[in-house]
Amino acid sequence: MQVDELLKPFPIKEFHPFPRALLGPGAHEMIGPEALKLGFKKTLVMTSGLRGSDIVHKITESMKYHGLEVVLYDKVESNPKDYNVMDAVKLYQENKCDSFVSIGGGSSHDACKGARISVAHDGRNVNDFEGFNKSENPRNPPHIAVSTTAGTGSETSWAYVITDTTTDPDNPHKYVAFDDASVATLAIDDPVLYYSCPIDYTAQCGFDVLAHASEPYVSRLNFEPSLGNALRAIKLTAENLRQATWNPSELSGREGMMYAQYIAAQAFNSGGLGIIHSISHAVSAFYDTHHGLNNAIALPRVWAFNMPVAYKRFADIAEVMGVDTHGMTDVQAADAALAAAIRLLRDVGIPEKFTDVTQDSYSKNRLGQGPTKFYEQASVIKGDDEDVDRITNHVLGDACTPGNAKECTFETVRPVVDHCMNGDLDDLLS
């Protein structure tokens, strides 16, 4: 075997930094003083609006009380689009802002990261920065990221995800940009802000956490500094997601998920992801469905796909998910981990395959709602051969795919995608 083959695929592994963070009940009340310490004067606040809650109003009023000028952009969409980013950049430039605050989940944080990178390059289109460290100016405006969901971890990671709707309007492309220059200046995670998160949305975000934690634990990167955080985040999710979903005003469950999502993101920040995320990105690109929901549907199928090359790692996952693995082989314990994940998915009420997802199946559903003609026409998830093929091809071009535990080809991945679209989860347990 040649040396280059021995070194494949990741001979040198890179540890990516995290921002400073404030975590715990009441942390969001520190935003005014913290912004002043960072030199903020006129801030662009980026958010989806968080309609149905008073979170944006409370935080912006607190900022104004501390003498900060606030410009509000509250039109960030789920699966943030390139035009969301560029509209915010224009508003930032027109108002001569000097800083950013993002309030919300991954969509708000990711759009804000993209806007900061664009601003640092005189308003260049955010799609120019797809890939790894494509920005050329490492200095961009300071950014405080305030999380209102326990899912994404974007407030502490070097990644942001944007949907390109303009390069080829008939084939939207959701991509990941990894850029050390995009890391937030300060992360604020406050479980009190999660109380108004809808039940189904809480559950879906929780499976985003489970994907963030499990993928680096079995990743071919095998990055030692990520493994402990990954396992701990899986344990916290298994212990707290049911409580956070069904007893949403109970602090313990919300706080447990806050820590789970935070350290899961720190695990994948350097430990990599896999095709749970690649499938999720592809389905979002074509149907604008929620990222956490997509991860939840893909996760059991991808675990089953990857288990033959990582039985011992999945056996570890079973143990931290509460399975008594005493006397089991690694293969048996790995199967038990898969069963535990499916049990959790069913316990929190998530649809089991993509063709089960309809316009009224969950509260944040955007099927057929626009914002472009493409999405208006994508009102039903097809799951036919053409749909499976285009999603599979998108998966193979996704930046997360190289880290997947098992090698991916069109022939091996297509059946996984097909099962995500149309298959029965009980098939995986037989």
Image: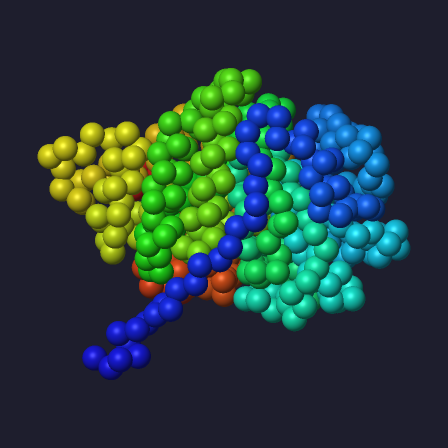
Q: Is residue 178 visible?
A: yes
What percent of the width, then of the height, locates residue 233?
A: 40, 38
Identified at 82% across, 30% down, the residue is: 65
Hey, which residue is sitting farthest right in the picture? 94
Q: Quadrant of residue 134?
A: bottom right
Identified at 73% across, 63% down, the residue is: 120
What percent of the width, then of the height, locates residue 55?
A: 71, 29
Hey, which residue is sitting farthest bottom in the picture? 2
What percent of the width, then of the height, locates residue 121?
A: 74, 67
Identified at 48% across, 39% down, the residue is: 261
Identified at 78% across, 56% down, the residue is: 89
Q: Observer-nearest residue: 267 or 423?
A: 267
Q: Quadrant of the C terminus?
A: top left
Q: Observer-nearest residue: 217 or 416?
A: 217
Q: Observer-nearest residue: 200 or 210?
A: 210
Q: Is residue 411 visible?
A: no
Hey, which residue is sitting farthest front in the picture? 37
Please say if 234 is above or below 138: above
Hey, which residue is sitting farthest left in the picture? 327
Q: How many marks?
A: 0
Q: Quadrant of residue 4?
A: bottom left
Please say if 71 is above or below 245: below
What percent of the width, then of the height, locates residue 263?
A: 45, 42
Q: Colour mode?
A: rainbow
Q: State left or right for residue 9 relative to residue 291.
A: left
Q: Observer-nearest residue: 342 or 90?
A: 90
Q: State left or right for residue 196 relative to residue 390.
A: right
Q: Quadrant of the N terminus?
A: bottom left
